[in-house]
Image (cartoon, rainbow, N blue to C red):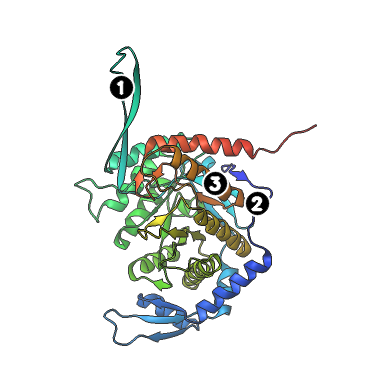
Amino acid sequence: MPREGTLIEKPLERLTLEQIERIHQASMEILTDPGLLCYNRQAAEIFQGNGAEVDTIPGSDHPCWTIKIPENLVQKALESAPKTVKLGARNPDNALIMHGDESRVYLITGSETNIWLDVNFETYTKKSDTSHEIEVPEFRPRRGTLADLCQAALVCEHLDTVDGFIRTVNIQDKDITEENKDVNKFFASLNNTSKHVMAGLTSLSQLDNVVNMAEIIAGGKDALRENPIISLITCLVKSPLQFVEDTTDTYIEICKRKLPVVVSSAPQAGSTAPIKEAGILAQINAEVLAGITLGQLVNPGAPVIYGSVPVRARMDTLADSYGCVETSQYNIDCVQLARYYRIPNYSTSGVCDPKFPGQQSTVERFFSDILVMLSGPQYLHCAFGLLDCNSVFCLPQAVLDDAHFKMVKFFLREPKID
């Protein structure tokens, strides 16, 4: 039996059906005019071969094309994209079955960070009364290592509310290279948790090694297809409206193999996207639909997930502001859009701006965790342990987040009145 998740019977909705349809139509207009810039030759040829309007941009330092995607191509892709996606696990009881039209939420760990935050409790003595002692946490940031990733996966294996594992820390050991990084981070994760493992790929050249390893662990090629113990995240569309070269190549190869893959877009309202809610929604929806369309043109039926990571810019530094209210609004809206297309949604909550665990991090995380979870995304990347706008991972914070979600899940239990 797969993991139960949390079924949201009456999901929180901010948008009316009419508003969703208006955003959909605006996205269709964006895809046809102005369309997208494409820095990937393979993608340009695929779109052109399937009826999209593709033109070369002359005088560019790098080969570049404009792609205008007709609405009928998008609709055809939405029809062929699976409405149910299975994410397997080493322990079959930890598999995740995601239905695009069912608001059953699975809680997943956070993104890869460069910094690991050690927490040590030091004892301090009161000067005026040496018998009075208190313990005070001290925080020491450092580069993440392979051992840290193993520890994070092992702890998350035993956190009750964690349904799946996204690699939490960038491994930066001296002997980790571009040639061995991907295999090491997938193996370290799989070896320390029996839950589903998702990660991005550092280098396309390592995709076959990662897949071969997953096949060995799963029990063979057919076994991996039946029980996909790994999935991948790709940010092939860079906001605003650009297919990047390397990640698009990776995405195409993943779709050829029919491995589950997230089409992730992360526009920043106020810089790489309009700050108005309707504007950023129309843009992110266009970007994700463009990615889904490409995947279905490559391999109809490839299991894709609607990935939404919208965020608002800080006006003082132009850094991401995950703790602001608008970021949660954007994410809830994207959950509705994905459900409109009946495609499973990868959404975001629980990310905060503070650098250390404390009152501000708790308020910001808890606020978005409750609201975004109530909207009913199938795959909620809810930032267990992440701090400082996704740049720091802290293990005690992950344990605190597990306690937060136990409170939310307790609240969501169906009342029994007889």
Quadrant including the N terminus: top right
Mark 1 belongs to which amino acid?
A: Thr
Instruction: Mark 2: give few (<14), some (14-19) or many (20+) Cα within 10 Å.
Output: many
Residue matched to label 2? 11
For label 3, the residue is: 106
> Residue 360: x percent and y percent?
44, 41
Q: Amino acid at mark 3?
A: Tyr
145 vs 50, nearest the viewer: 145
Q: Nearer the viewer, mark 2 or mark 1?
A: 1
> Which residue shows up at 59% across the image and 71% down it?
24
- What SS does tag 1 mark? strand
Front-most of 208 and 394? 394
Q: Position of residue 315 (x, y in %)?
A: 40, 60
Q: Amino acid at mark 2?
A: Pro
Of marks 2 and 1, which one's residue comes earlier in the chain?
Answer: 2
Residue 126 sits in which quadrant?
Answer: top left
Q: Is residue 160 visible?
A: no
Residue at 40% from the left image edge and 79% from the top image edge: 44
Q: Give the number of the mark in front: 2 or 3.
A: 2
